[in-house]
Image (tube, grey):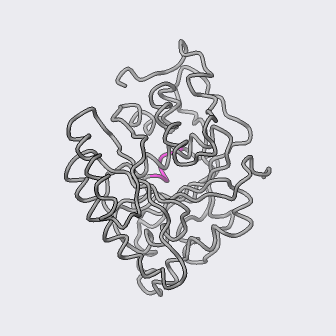
């Protein structure tokens, strides 16, 4: 592979939540697709026992192994890494997306639905399991091959989530804009922080946590939830901050998943603006870098733009 286009060490993001349905896979897939479109070398890693991210993108190469081999061996080898296909043959967009030659999108697929990996993990030392992703991702062969790793996780506390958290440089926590989800976010995050306090004995600290409101609407509830989360900063041990960027509710995200493409291809205007703002806030050093399929670089008269934005 070519040398990284950025001059910083490989960054590892883990998308977490203590409950399902918060948009973890949506964020993982679309941030990964946007970064690859800009020209970064991206590795997605599906650490969810219900492998939604593994099914999001079509593949140009299907590896014989995946998450199970990675976890059991403690090494990430090429036979565990599949290659995503951008764009798939089934894509029917009116314009041909422009993809920078430097960018790539690979994925370690989840293959745990038979339950055998979970059975194996139940017999292992929990501390060993906690580092089962961190060690292989920090290998020179991986850190020199990719600029960004994005790990999608299960919506529950468990060994896979623990390993994904310990591997990360930053945690991204999607929050739905309703009171029930907000309360679950606060209580679940407190328990998650307490669960990982034990790693401080090993000289390690929990990565910084960034919350992002997802599927938002311009409602009083959304504004109240934003305030509640901000007021919970101290109660959450000062470990989590709420991003200024937010992800509005829009049909473009569903259309993108159906088409197996990043959302900024479906809507190069509003959804693309949203994803760029989110990316820039997460990685300030890339602010000002745009995907070639963003509105400033395409003919909007020929673009497929969702009318429901």
- The answer to whether residue 51 is above or below residue 279 is below
- State the image coordinates of residue 98 (x, y, percent, origin top left): 65, 29
Residue for point 64% across, 29% down: 292
User: Magenta stretch: residue 156 in it?
Assistant: no
Residue for point 54% across, 16% down: 300
- State the image coordinates of residue 252 (x, y, percent, origin top left): 41, 31
Q: Quadrant of residue 82?
A: bottom right
- The answer to whether residue 261 is above or below residue 176 is above
User: Magenta stretch: residue 56 in it?
Assistant: yes
Q: Main secondary structure of the magenta part?
A: helix
- Name the outermost residue toward the top: 301
Residue for point 41% across, 23% down: 306
- Count of numbered labels shown in the rendering: 0
Residue for point 29% across, 58% down: 232
- State the image coordinates of residue 151 (x, y, percent, origin top left): 51, 59
For the residue pair 24 and 184, the one nearer the viewer reads as 184
For the residue pair 114 and 142, the one nearer the viewer reads as 142
- Name the outermost residue toward the right: 2
- State the image coordinates of residue 137 (x, y, percent, origin top left): 63, 67
Q: Quadrant of the C terminus?
A: top left
Give the extent of the magenta segment. Answer: 53-57
Q: Quadrant of residue 220?
A: top left
Left or right of 248: which side holds 265? right
- The answer to whether residue 66 is above or below residue 272 is below
């Amino acid at each position: 592979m070519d040398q990284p286009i950025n001059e910083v060490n490989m960054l590892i993001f883990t998308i977490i939540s203590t409950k399902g349905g918060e948009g973890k896979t949506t964020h993982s897939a679309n941030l990964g697709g946007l970064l690859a479109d800009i020209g970064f070398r991206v590795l997605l890693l599906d650490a969810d026992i219900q492998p939604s991210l593994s099914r999001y993108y079509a593949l140009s190469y299907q590896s014989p192994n995946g998450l199970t081999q990675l976890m059991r061996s403690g090494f990430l080898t090429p036979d565990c890494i599949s290659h995503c296909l951008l764009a798939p043959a089934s894509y029917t967009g009116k314009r041909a997306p422009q993809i920078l030659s430097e960018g790539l999108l690979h994925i370690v697929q989840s293959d745990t639905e038979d339950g055998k990996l979970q059975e194996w993990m139940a017999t292992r030392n929990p501390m060993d399991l906690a580092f089962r992703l961190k060690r292989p991702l920090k290998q020179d062969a991986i850190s020199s091959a990719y600029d960004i790793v994005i790990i999608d996780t299960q919506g529950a506390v468990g060994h896979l989530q623990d390993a994904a958290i310990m591997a990360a440089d930053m945690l991204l926590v999607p929050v739905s804009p309703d009171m029930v989800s907000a309360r679950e976010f606060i209580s679940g995050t407190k328990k998650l922080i307490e669960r990982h306090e034990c790693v401080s004995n090993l000289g390690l600290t929990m990565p910084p946590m960034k919350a992002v409101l997802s599927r938002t609407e311009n409602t009083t509830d959304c504004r109240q939830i934003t305030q509640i989360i901000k007021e919970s900063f101290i109660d959450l041990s000062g470990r989590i901050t709420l991003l200024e960027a937010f992800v509005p509710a829009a049909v473009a995200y569903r259309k993108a998943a159906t088409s197996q493409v990043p959302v900024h291809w479906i809507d190069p205007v509003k959804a693309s603006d949203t994803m760029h703002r989110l990316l820039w806030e997460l990685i300030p050093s890339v602010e000002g870098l745009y995907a070639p399929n963003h509105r400033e670089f395409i003919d909007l008269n020929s673009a497929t733009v969702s009318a429901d934005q």
